[in-house]
Image (cartoon, rainbow, N blue to C red):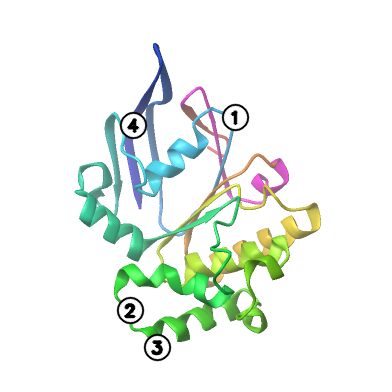
Amino acid sequence: MYQIDTLTKTYQQGKRVVHALQDVSLRIDDGELVSIQGPTGGGKSTLLQMLGGLDRPTSGSISLDGTDLAGMNDTDLTRVRAETIGFVFQNFNLIPTLTAQENVETALVPSGVSKEERAARAVAALESVSLGDRADHLPGELSGGQQQRVAIARALVKNPKVLLADEPTGNLDEETRDEIVDLLEGLWKEQGLTLILVTHDSVVARRTPRRLRIAKGQVKDLTA
């Protein structure tokens, strides 16, 4: 469970102070599927980065299962990200010179998993996203939808508790978008994940049981 209390994040841009998040308080229970919408620059990605321990707040607290992410040292925070949180990004972030299987395996390297186990788990993860027959293909040999499936497999191979997706369908056509959302929704149900996705697409957001909107650094729960 995430518990966020009076979370604030400010940036300095030249002489101007940008309030990316302002006194956000929020709870996200285990196993929820939540979408976050809002205008560009409204704070969506900043909030997702906080949830993933990729950035630290200026003030306030954000805890996962009772542990304050903002108060953890870098070593412990890296371990939490490696073991508990999976990330999916709009631009896939695949390494072009590695095969699909090798890209998925990279997520397990920080955990010290043996080479044999990395390979076995990567193949299983690719099969879970219907890409078992593309394991030896390079990203450039895959379609955009297939590349996003590899990215999802890379996030899932760690067996995370939380999956954070930042505009996972932003670079895809409508048909492929629907396929990826179907996949994510199916994995959420099957694996009991806490799935939080940032999206500009209202079609995607309407498919989630809980919808948040963030604008000018403040969050409104549209399903409350």
Q: Crowdedness of circle 3 by 10 Å Cα count: few (<14), some, many (20+)?
A: few
| Circle number at residue 164 | none
Q: Which residues are magenta?
A: 202-217
Give the Cα distance between marks 2 and 1. Answer: 39 Å
Q: Secondary structure at mark 1?
A: loop
Question: Label 2 belongs to which residue?
Answer: 113
Observer-side mark, 2 or 1, equals 2
Observer-side mark, 4 or 2, equals 2
Q: Crowdedness of circle 4 by 10 Å Cα count: few (<14), some, many (20+)?
A: many
Question: Label 1 belongs to which residue?
Answer: 40
Q: Look at label 3 and name its amino acid.
A: Glu
Give the Cα distance between marks 4 and 2. Answer: 35 Å
Q: Look at label 1 and name its amino acid.
A: Thr
Give the Cα distance between marks 4 and 3. Answer: 42 Å
User: Are the two marked residues, 1 and 3, in contact with CB atoms closer than 8 angstroms?
Assistant: no
The mark that comes first in sequence, 4 or 2, is 4
Q: Crowdedness of circle 2 by 10 Å Cα count: few (<14), some, many (20+)?
A: some
Residue at (50, 68) in percent of width and height: 154
Residue 60 % position (x, y):
27, 32
Observer-side mark, 4 or 1, equals 1
Q: Look at label 4 and name its amino acid.
A: Leu
Q: Quadrant of residue 50?
A: top left
**Residue 205 painted magenta:** yes
Give the Cα distance between marks 4 and 1. Answer: 20 Å
Q: Crowdedness of circle 1 by 10 Å Cα count: few (<14), some, many (20+)?
A: few
Residue at (20, 43) in percent of width and height: 71
The mark that comes first in sequence, 4 or 3, is 4
Give the Cα distance between marks 3 and 2. Answer: 8 Å
Q: Look at label 2 and name its amino acid.
A: Val
The mark that comes first in sequence, 2 or 1, is 1
